[in-house]
Amino acid sequence: MLYPIMPIYLRTIGFSIVLIGVLEGIAEATAGLSKGYFGKLSDVSGKRVPFVRLGYALSALSKPMMAVFVYPLWVFFSRTADRFGKGIRTGARDAMLSEEATLETKGRVFGFHRSMDTLGAVLGPLSALVYLYFFPEDYRTLFFIAFIPGLIAVFATLRVREERNGSVSSGKKVASFFSFLNYWKQSTFDYRKVVLGLLVFALFNSSDVFLLLKAKEAGVTDSGIIGIYVFYNLVYALSSFPMGVLADKIGLKNIFISGLILFSTVYFGMSANTNFYVIAGLFFLYGIYAAATEGISKAWISNLSEKKDTATAIGFYAGLQSICAMLASTLAGLLWYRFGAATTFLVTGTGAILVIIYFLVVIKRY
């Protein structure tokens, strides 16, 4: 609900573009690193639900906090608390999904979760647009409204019961915030090969904001850009579960590589096109790419780790992925500023091709 109006709201309370960038960078880095730490903590404790519950509660509480006070330091604290909540819950939640699946159903379980999650990215912005149509520029009220579904999510977790995980992760305690990084040495060789490829791809996979900016540069109106964003998420939501089912049948690796092929096609296409219908078609392909990679990558990782280390394995990847994504967006911005949009998209598409070759040559199974 809040994602598309967040930068607009921050501008209305005095945030500059630079300050918004710093805020988002710190918030995402916090989320990324905490995913690894709390994933490890979940494995060590043998518990999942408390981390999921606390994570959703913290994110829910952060929504009205951003509307109550508008001082920059408080906004930084509130936004970081939201992302911190995401970091607390992600590893434990994905481990729960993995534990409820078998090797034969991992794709559809993670795909179904991805579909439902992304459906929120369709219904949320649409509901925000409807509200703002009747109450223009009343951004603060939206933050209070967003607290309601967040609270419902927390209460929903109260109905989830779990028994203590009998197999507790190796390592008696979590020594420091960065102790999850030690998992790299403990992980299997197959895990390291796959995660290395995923992280290299993350270094090329910059923020989707650059795709929207390219559409804007091509002459698409503001309402058209919002429509394309909603359209992309709708395709993503509708495709994720079927992609998961298909991955269980023909292999997670095959579906993931197909997604990378679509990704490179989109970026090569966006580098040269200004036609609205072509751009809309490329966003359609981009939605399918996301469905073929996002949930699939986590399902793939969970298959390469022991049950007692699942949250750590996913958290390790998610944490470093966030850092790589931040670096990718910085690099994309520099390339765009120095050489133009076309060069930025050509470099990204070429990087994806290199990663495809890596997975085809180095990863023989899955």
Image: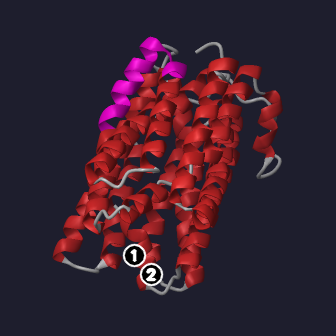
Specify the amino acid type for callout 2: Arg
Q: Is residue 285 above or below residue 187?
A: below
Majority SS type along the magenta span: helix
Q: Is residue 165 magenta?
A: no
- Could you tell me residue 1's position as x and y percent? 34, 61
Q: Can you give x and y, in whole percent of width and height, for residue 318 in the image?
A: 62, 43
Instruction: Look at the image and tell me whether residue 162 can be seen.
Output: no
Query: Taking 351 as reference, is 129 left or right?
Result: left
- Residue at the location (69% across, 43% down)? 41
- Tell me the distance, in whole angstroms, between the alpha carbons under discs 2 and 1: 5 Å
Q: Residues within 10 Å of mark 2 (few under 14, many from 20)?
A: few
**Image point 30% across, 43% down: which residue?**
281
Q: Are marks 2 and 1 in contact (CB under 8 Å)?
A: yes
Above-or-below relation of 330 to 55 = below
Q: Residue at x 51, y 82 (%)?
A: 15
In the image, residue 38 lies at what x, y percent? 66, 46
Viewer-closest of 284 and 12: 284
What's drawn in magenta, residue-wise?
237-254
Helix, strand or loop status at disc 1: helix
Judging depth in this view, the residue of 161 and 333 nearest the camera is 333
SS category of the residue bearing label 2: helix
Which residue is at the front of the view, 311 or 124?
Answer: 124
Q: Which image quarter: residue 343? A: bottom right
Residue at position x 25%, y 59% in the image: 126
Residue 257 rendering spot, x and y as whole percentages: 52, 26
Q: Is residue 242 left or right of residue 174?
A: left
Quarter-of-image position of residue 159? top left
Q: Based on the picture, tell me whether residue 238 belongs to the magenta stretch.
A: yes
Circle 2 is placed at which residue position? 11
Amino acid type at image mark 1 = Ile
The residue tagged 1 is: 8
